Image (tube, coloured by chain):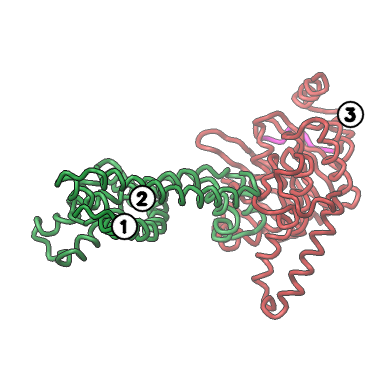
Chain colours: A green, B red
């Protein structure tokens, strides 16, 4: 089992799981985050407080705990719902936990971004006869996006590394895979996992820089 | 027949009464200057005319049509407010240009969005958009910015930004163009270029309401002047009357304070 190419290929294979969780989480948590933002900014007070309490709970408890609760909770509470058996169930449950968790963080970033746009921008749109929808999509949105690229980028980079928490509910991602070797006295695979994360984050950083430059043509 | 009649407008924020019994009228082609110290309600009055604030009392009549009546909720429906707003244009103190659009696009954007509501938009889209471009270019050359069409707002000076804002407001051809302290956010050396544009508009008999602290300018350009203090109109009349021979004690005090500074 000390065959280096075999170990590397097994590490790479398990890192694919990290990548999948990363991609799926991002895909769903960004739009869900926007929905949560609208909820937390709603003028209907009960909805606003409900949503803000939910965000508080999610941001106020460890993601690791959320993974456990989401995966084992339905069974322990004798709920009618249960996750599919085996790997598939663990994978879906992990994604659900990640999506909810990251959507809450994103929603707060979005809210900050939307609230940071000066009232004058809305008013300028209003006196020019634009509808609320037009003001949001034609005037406000791009300014918000420009403002939130750095903090969202931060979260996205955190997500890359957080994906390894999925091992808590026995998703065989890269750290768990490397851990099996270190338990048997072979430590370098565990160190090697760092390189995977570093490379991934490096590529992301380049992408985020590119996006920031792309939006650099105007100032807010 | 006046183009604008404001009848007994009143507005409070909580217990603070910011406007009280404001009545005046404006003839087509006239320029009205509103002067007064900070907190006198001038800006709130302009914001009421532009439906950015909702008056608690009173009526606003444009071209003989009651566009707002505090006693009649039918005149306050959100869907109609958007259309009624277009009777008025508003140039803000802080310009409020859209930073992500070029100078030209700032002027055309609202026109393009409104054009989508025309029944013939789909068939004649190209012609309509061309026409909007041309109109915007004409307006921008009127305010002396033909060479800045493709610039973004952060690339031009405050005075130039304000001139873009004026062109943007003019593009919608409002019946009445309102200015909310248009030079207050500008460095002194930049106010001249903006005032020149407004003076030009006055000479072309654009109907305007200008809230300003530039007394000399108000005196020179306005056909009529309103002096406000503490949410009420203290005095109104021709510039000669209000500036040259004010009747009210409060007006006199205000003017001496201002000419001293």
Question: Residue visible at 88% across and 40% down?
Answer: B221
Callout 3 and callout 2 share a chain: no
Quarter where residue B129 is shown: bottom right
Callout 3 and callout 1 share a chain: no
Q: Where is residue B121 in the image (x, y as percent from the top left)?
A: 68, 75
| Residue at the outermost top position | B260
Q: Does the magenta stretch include residue A192?
A: no
The answer to whether residue A52 shows anywhere in this view is yes
Q: Is mark 1 on a helix, strand or loop?
A: helix
Q: Position of residue A45 (x, y in %)?
A: 36, 48
User: Rounded to the nearest whole Å, what is the CA distance between mark 3 and mark 2?
Assistant: 80 Å
**Chain on which label 2 sits:** A
Give the mark count.
3
Q: Are marks 1 and 2 in contact (CB under 8 Å)?
A: yes
User: Rounded to the nearest whole Å, what is the CA distance between mark 1 and mark 2?
Assistant: 8 Å
Quarter where residue B65 is shown: bottom right
Name the front one of labels 3 and 2: 2
Q: Is mark 3 on a helix, strand or loop?
A: helix
**Chain on which label 3 sits:** B
**Chain on which label 1 sits:** A
The 10 Å Cα crowd at callout 1, few under 14, some 14 to 19, many 20 or more, is some
Q: Mark 3 points at which residue?
A: B244
Q: Mark 2 points at which residue?
A: A196
Question: Residue visible at 72% across and 36% down?
Answer: B233
Q: Do the residues labelled 3 and 2 touch (CB within 8 Å)?
A: no
Q: Are marks 3 and 1 in contact (CB under 8 Å)?
A: no
Q: Which of B187 and B25 is in front in this view?
A: B187
Question: Residue visible at 68% across and 35% down?
Answer: B232
Residue range in magenta is B232-237
Q: Position of residue A185 (x, y in %)?
A: 16, 44
């Amino acid at each position: 089992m000390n065959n280096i190419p075999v170990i590397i290929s097994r590490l790479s294979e398990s890192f694919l799981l990290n990548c999948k969780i990363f991609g799926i989480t991002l895909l769903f948590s960004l739009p869900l985050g926007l929905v949560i933002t609208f909820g937390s900014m709603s003028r209907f007070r009960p909805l606003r407080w409900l949503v803000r309490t939910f965000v508080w709970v999610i941001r106020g408890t460890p993601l690791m705990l959320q993974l456990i609760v989401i995966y084992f909770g339905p069974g322990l509470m004798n709920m009618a719902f249960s996750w599919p058996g085996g790997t598939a169930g663990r994978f879906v449950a992990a994604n659900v936990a990640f999506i909810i968790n990251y959507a809450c963080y994103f929603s707060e970033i979005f809210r900050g971004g939307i609230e940071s746009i000066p009232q004058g921008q809305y008013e300028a749109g209003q006196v020019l006869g634009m509808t609320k929808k037009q003001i949001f999509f034609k005037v406000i949105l791009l300014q918000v996006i420009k403002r939130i690229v750095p903090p969202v980028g931060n979260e996205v980079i955190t997500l890359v590394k957080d994906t390894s928490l999925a091992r808590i509910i026995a998703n065989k991602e890269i750290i768990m895979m490397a851990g099996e070797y270190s338990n048997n006295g072979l430590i370098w695979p565990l160190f090697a996992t760092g390189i995977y994360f570093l490379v991934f984050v490096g590529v992301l950083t380049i992408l985020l820089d590119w996006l920031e430059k792309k939006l650099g043509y105007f100032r807010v | 027949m006046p183009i604008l009649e404001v009848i007994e407008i009143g507005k409070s924020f909580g217990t603070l009464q910011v406007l009280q019994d404001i009545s005046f009228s404006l003839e087509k082609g006239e320029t009205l200057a509103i002067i007064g110290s900070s907190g006198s309600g001038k800006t709130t009055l302009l914001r009421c005319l532009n439906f950015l604030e909702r008056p608690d009392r009173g009526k606003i009549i444009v071209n003989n049509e009651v566009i707002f009546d505090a006693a009649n909720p039918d005149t306050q429906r959100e869907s109609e407010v958007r259309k009624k707003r277009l009777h008025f244009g508003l140039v803000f103190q802080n310009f409020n240009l859209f930073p992500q659009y070029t100078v030209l696009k700032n002027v055309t954007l609202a026109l393009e969005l409104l054009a989508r509501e025309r029944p013939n938009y789909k068939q004649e889209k190209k012609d309509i958009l061309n026409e909007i471009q041309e109109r915007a270019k004409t307006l921008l050359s009127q305010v002396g910015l033909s060479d800045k069409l493709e610039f973004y707002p952060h690339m031009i000076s405050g005075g130039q930004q304000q001139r873009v804002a004026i062109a943007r407001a003019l593009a919608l051809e409002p019946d009445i163009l309102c200015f909310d302290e248009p030079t207050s956010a500008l460095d002194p050396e930049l106010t001249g270029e903006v005032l020149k544009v407004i003076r030009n508009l006055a000479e072309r008999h654009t109907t305007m309401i200008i809230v300003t602290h530039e007394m000399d300018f108000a005196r020179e350009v306005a056909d009529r002047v309103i002096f406000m203090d503490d949410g009420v109109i203290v005095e109104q009349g021709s510039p000669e009357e209000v500036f040259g021979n004010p009747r009210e004690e409060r007006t006199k005090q205000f003017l001496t304070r201002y000419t001293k500074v």
